Amino acid sequence: MVGPRLYHYLDVPGQHTLEVYERNGGYQALKKALSMDRATLVDQVKAAAIRGRGGAGFPMGNKWGTIPPGSTTIYITCNADESEPGTCSNREVLERDPHQLIESMIICAYALEHVRTCYIYIRGEYRLGAERLNQAIQDARAQGYLGDNIMGTGFNLDIWVFRGAGAYICGEETALIESIEGKRGQPRLRPPYFPTVMGITNKPTVVNNVETIINIIPVVLYGADGYKAYGTEKSPGTKLYCMSGHIKKPGVYEAPFTVTLRQLIWDFAGGMLNDRKFKTLIPGGASFQWFTEEQLDTVMGFDEVRAAGSNLGSTGIMVMDETTCVVDAALNLVHFFAHESCGKCTPCREGTRWLEQIIWRIEHGQGRAGEVDQLLDITDNMDGKCFCLLGESAIVPVRSSISLFREEWDHHVTHKNCMVQRDYRMSSTAQPH
Amino acid sequence: MPLSEAALAECHELIARYPTAKCALLQILWVAQREYGSINQDVMREVAELLRIRPVEVADVVSFYFMYRKQPMGTYTISVCDTLSCALLGAFNLIDYLEGKLGIKCGQTTPDGRISLEAAECLGACSDAPVLTVDFYHQLKVTPEKIDELLARMERGEEIGQEMRPPEWWETPTGWPTTPMPDGQNPNPQPNQPTQVPK
């Protein structure tokens, strides 16, 4: 590995095989970790302050710290249920570099000591990812990196792939655990706030995102200080920024947390598609506030984006140009949330449907006077009343686009048409019911 | 028709991976779906017996996850992503094109039982939008021409695997960004190169 970078070998042909992975320095971190004292290893992880890449930005070391002392059975679960619209970095890792994840999980399990079994919860749609992971696990086991008495240290570990079956909500960690327990993927009541207290069959369970877990390799190889060479004091390391939408070279780009949106769009992604005018973007996947041109110089770190009024989330950056109708874009996202609502709580189950129905009418020239305000009223009634974050997320595209582009919404209602010259429609013509 | 010996052995191996038998439910359902093609009430009863849980617990799960098919699907299942990143780049035009070509609507199967078509929520390949999957193997940057080619391959009964992105699409940058930071700082700080490179 060249410096603390995660994506360096992604495009090497055959990187998903054990042979090529080992040739590129694979399993060196595991060998080093196994020779280290467990307490030192945990201290290094805590000192490195690896922040959770899944959305909340909660440091991995602190999460480990919430495991009740004296626990004798701990599960580690890797959250590979990447379903947030705009996010696609995990899929690349799972398909092209699965050993990186497996090596990282073995190191985590070794550090926490009382782990005998790890699960990788991969979303059902990632069929090749699941196949490659299974193959990688089999190869690692044959090589003695997994199973009983790993590399002669007397440490035993199994990793199993758990294939989900198509539910966005299972990315929520308590819903993910319900799903592993063989139930509907509906979130659990908090507290306890962390599954590290009560997880799979009420045993402590550490749930970490793929991207968070793989950060442990550079920490082990270069130490906490070497890892902190990139990024900022509070957000050390690099991030995989998923760029999509109206840009010339959409892709997943690795950069330190000090990168700005302008750099990501014009340096990495080659600028706006067809050199059209930038309109708006979503910085962290569908669930977070939209940015306009004014915020393009925002530094893409956890705290900086939060200070600018949004959230880094899973860094699914969706860029929209002047040909985008914001009403249609909001309808697309609200439809997503309405479809994925698990139905457990009423504000989310009913609220997302109402939002979708009203926005569909506005988009299709059937909006009535006052309906834009009615939408805002519904979002007020959902805000803070939903069981989990899905419902809270569904209102964001509505609120964000109305507050930033109110005149477009009003134009839709009064003139029954759109003020934007657009290339494509972005929602179904069938009326939702 | 009960599960084959081999499938049953696979199920028992799966059950052994989890602290309780019920934890293996979703994985057993994948095996059952592979064997039977879809999951009807008889299959649910059989799975329930295997795991020693009530059939209603199985039905509860099957009805929640859309990838467990309640009706038999076509030989090929085409799922077109219709969420924002793909929609921005014309996903709905692809859906219209496919519906016209196949003469069916999303959620239906062609009368000859060959192809099922569905609109899917975000398929996790946003950077290669617009995407669709054939039996959940991704096809990237899809165009009508690419659809014609895929349909022709299905006509010939070929197996369709995952399309892998060629490296040049993204051109993973060799350095860090070059545009100056807003406060005039050096955009490309040379980090303290880690000295302890593993041997």
Image (tube, rainbow, N blue to C red):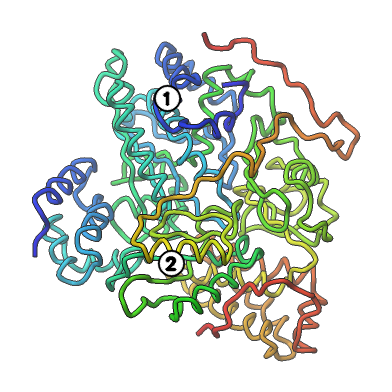
> Label 1: how many residues lie within 10 Å, few (<14), some (14-19) or many (20+)?
many
Q: Chain of mark 2?
A: A
Query: Secondary structure beneath disc 1?
Result: helix
What is the x, y in percent for residue B69? 31, 68
Find residue A270 and report its horizontal and vertical position in percent: 76, 46
Nearest to the observer: residue A125 or residue A315: A125
Name the one closer to the observer, B145 or A219.
B145
Which of marks 1 and 2 precedes in the sequence? 1
Q: Is residue B73 left or right of residue B121?
A: left
Pick the front one: A40 or A245: A245
Q: In the image, which disc is placed on residue A107? A: 1
Q: Which residue is disc 2 drawn over?
A: A342
- Gap between marks 2 and 1 measured at Cα: 34 Å
Q: Which residue is located at x 72 percent, y 58 percent?
A: A246
At x 79% / y 50%, what residue is drawn?
A271
Q: Where, by quadrant of the figure, is residue A156 drawn?
A: top left
Marking on residue A433? none
Q: Quick one: label 2, few (<14), some, or many (20+) residues within 10 Å?
A: many
Q: Secondary structure at mark 2?
A: loop
